[in-house]
Amino acid sequence: NLVISSAQAKALRYKAHEKVSEALGGKDSNAYKKMRNKTYSACWREFWNYFNINEYRELPKTRFEEGMKFLLSWQPSTTLRMEIEQCNTQIEMNLSQ
């Protein structure tokens, strides 16, 4: 049972970063500044649960493509999406006053 290489681990990290940033509305968004850690945790927790591993570096090499597909498909839960939307809307209202 060989695990992914460091290059593959880097690719997974990059894809997770891309998806989390997108879900939060970009690096300049209020949600990114305030909810980044919570959202990364949610993403990785779902990844670990799906693959039944304790950290992404334990992903079997044979499941790397499936891991990338998982991260490409990942979206925050409805509750988390609502929190993100509320956080981003809050800053918009503050700016317009």
Image (cartoon, rainbow, N blue to C red):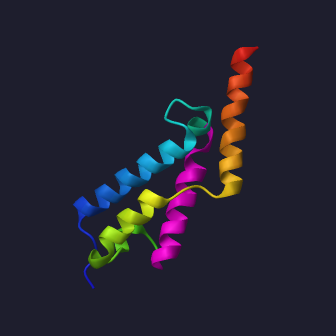
In the rendered image, the vertical position of residue 86 relative to residue 8, given as above or below: above
What residue is drawn where x is 64% and y is 58%?
Answer: 77
Residue 73 is left or right of residue 76, and the answer is left
Quarter holding the C terminus?
A: top right
Image coords of residue 37 (percent x, y): 56, 49
| Residue 48 part of the magenta segment | yes
Image coords of residue 2 (percent x, y): 25, 80
In the rendered image, the vertical position of residue 91 relative to residue 36, given as above or below: above
- Looking at the picture, tell me which residue is in the foreground, 3 or 46: 46
Q: Quadrant of residue 42?
A: bottom right
In the rendered image, the vertical position of residue 40 relative to residue 85, given as above or below: below
Farthest-out residue, bottom: 1
Q: Quadrant of residue 85?
A: top right
Magenta region, main secondary structure: helix
What residue is drawn where x is 61% and y is 44%?
Answer: 35
- Looking at the picture, tell me which residue is in the foreground, 36 or 15: 15
Residue 10 is left or right of residue 41, and the answer is left
| Residue 90 part of the magenta segment | no
Residue 11 is left or right of residue 54, and the answer is left
> Total of numbered circles in the picture?
0
What residue is drawn where x is 37% and y is 55%?
Answer: 13
Image coords of residue 88 (percent x, y): 66, 34
Image coords of residue 52 (percent x, y): 48, 79
Farthest-out residue, right: 97
Quarter holding the N terminus?
A: bottom left
Q: Quadrant of residue 46?
A: bottom right
Q: Which residues are the magenta region?
A: 34-53
What residue is drawn where x is 50% and y is 75%?
Answer: 50
